[in-house]
Image (cartoon, rainbow, N blue to C red):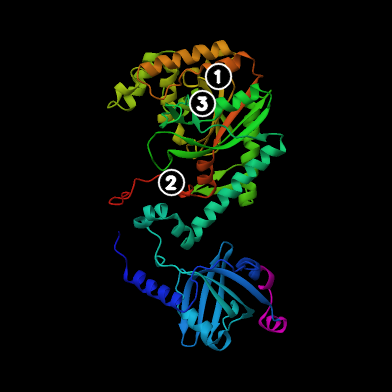
Amino acid sequence: MEKRSNEFQQRMIKLEELRKRGIDPYPNDFKPETTCAEVIANLGSLKKEELEGRNEVVTVAGRIMAKRSFGKASFVHIQDSSGKLQVYFKKDTLGPEGYSLFKECDVGDFIGVRGSVFRTKTDELTVMADELRLLSKGLNPLPEKWHGLKDVEARYRQRYLDLTVNPRSREVFLKRTRIVGLMREFLAKRGFIEVETPMMQHIPGGAAAKPFVTFHNALGQDLYLRIAPELYLKRLVIGGFERVFEINRNFRNEGISTQHNPEFTMLEFYQAYATYEDLMDMTEELIISVVKDLHGTLKIEYQGQALDFTPPWQRLSVRDAILKHSGAKSDIFNDRQKAYEFLKGMNPALPGLWKGFSHGKIIAEIFEETAEAALVQPTFVTQWPADVSPLARRNPDDSSLVDRFELLITGKEIANAFSELNDPLDQRERFVMQVKERRAGDQEAHPMDEDFLRALEYGMPPAAGEGIGIDRLVMILTDSPSIRDVILFPLLRAEQGKKET
């Protein structure tokens, strides 16, 4: 058991004293009638004399965040989910028994109070408590300081404390909830239905990623945490649900960085009788509506960079982006060896990593190495190599490319979309090529999925689909530098020395 602080021990003594006096330190029969924010909204415009004349009585509850005592009187700030409010405790008003109970309350405790609202000499709106209930005794003290690099991991590991003492963190997650709600409303208004697809799958498909593996005892076989819901959502399009979406958790057994968390949230949607160009227009409209609602303007800042979401957004092919930002010559698009030599020249230490790549995969790698970070303003990058897009429809004018776009903002991939491949024979050929790449050592290559191919053989209408990374979009719209800042409980290494017993 970890060593307890002196303050913890002192609070334990208080806890026992309260119980000896017949006071339940953890009751569940107090009902606040209003919130701190509602008190301020309803009465904050009234002057001192107006409040005295109205004698407004409120019943509120919250956590004690600060406490200042002056002999027989004290001020505290309580905090609920809506904000903070000052409460005044005076022995003459609360009575000896009530004030004695208040003296046993510490910063971090939850209390409920009833009393009239007035303004102090400093003009702060305050509740004069005439009734007090202790609702939950906190045994661990709240941290006095909660900022700076040394506290970053503690903030992620103990998010409950971060949310308690860090208003900025609470604001980020409230905005995240708002963003998700706005996206859901946007799609619902356009006739999309929300669905749920399996998180445990027999075949991990729908993306190029290494899955997490688990074992199901009753079935006696391995299952995989989903890396994407794509193939199940397309099965629903085949089944007649022409507009579907899911806000889902995906799991990918990959590294952790400021941009990556192994468990993350995606909005994925599919629309029959639509193309990737239709989805570019809709994505622009969707994100613009969210930015406007959240910020009231289309010009915002992200980590010191000015971003302008004013339409139309830039549309740029992979080829044009590479030529613009890499210094490469156009012959790399026609000659695999020249593309490989160019890529190897950028990083001579890693030629073996790319030696077995197909031409299209080398081109995609060159884009990521040279152009991606330069695309700061919202940009749709189109015309991707078919080699890296095994589920997308081929471009009718160039079969080496597919009708696909990625949306990049601040150099981050925010969305990926394409016109869907609904030719079951072409899809089988693509899967066969992916299986060959998997056997050659590419652990992220797409596996064969016979059931999905069987579904395609029944016929899928022409369609387009898209995935939007909610975590990264929230990062940009809340000016958060790390993906861990926008995930309530990001994955962390287990604390050293804290193992189950």
Cα distance between the residues tagged 1 and 2: 32 Å
Is residue 422 visible in the rendered structure shown here? no
Q: Name the spot of residue 40 as percent of width and height, x first.
A: 64, 70
Q: Is residue 118 left or right of residue 229?
A: right
Q: Which residue is mark 3?
A: 206
Identify which residue is drawn at 53% across, 52% down: 173
Are the residues flagged by discs 1 and 2 in contact, CB closer than 8 Å? Answer: no
Q: Residues within 10 Å of mark 3 (few under 14, many from 20)?
A: some
Residue 490: which disc?
2
Q: Name the spot of residue 232 as percent of width and height, x first.
A: 57, 26
Q: Name the spot of residue 315 as percent of width and height, x first.
A: 57, 30
Q: Which residue is mark 1?
A: 452
Sequence-earlier tag: 3 or 2: 3
Query: Would you identify the image quadrant in which residue 89 lies?
Result: bottom right
Q: Is residue 376 left or right of residue 256?
A: right
The kind of residue on which mark 2 rests is Pro
The kind of residue on which mark 1 rests is Phe
Sequence-earlier tag: 1 or 2: 1
Badge 2 marks a residue whose secondary structure is: loop
Tell me the magenta residue range: 41-54
Question: What quarter of the picture does the N terminus occupy?
Answer: bottom left
The kind of residue on which mark 3 rests is Gly
Cα distance between the residues tagged 3 and 1: 11 Å
Query: Can you say whether 126 is above or below 489 in the image?
Result: below
Sequence-earlier tag: 3 or 1: 3
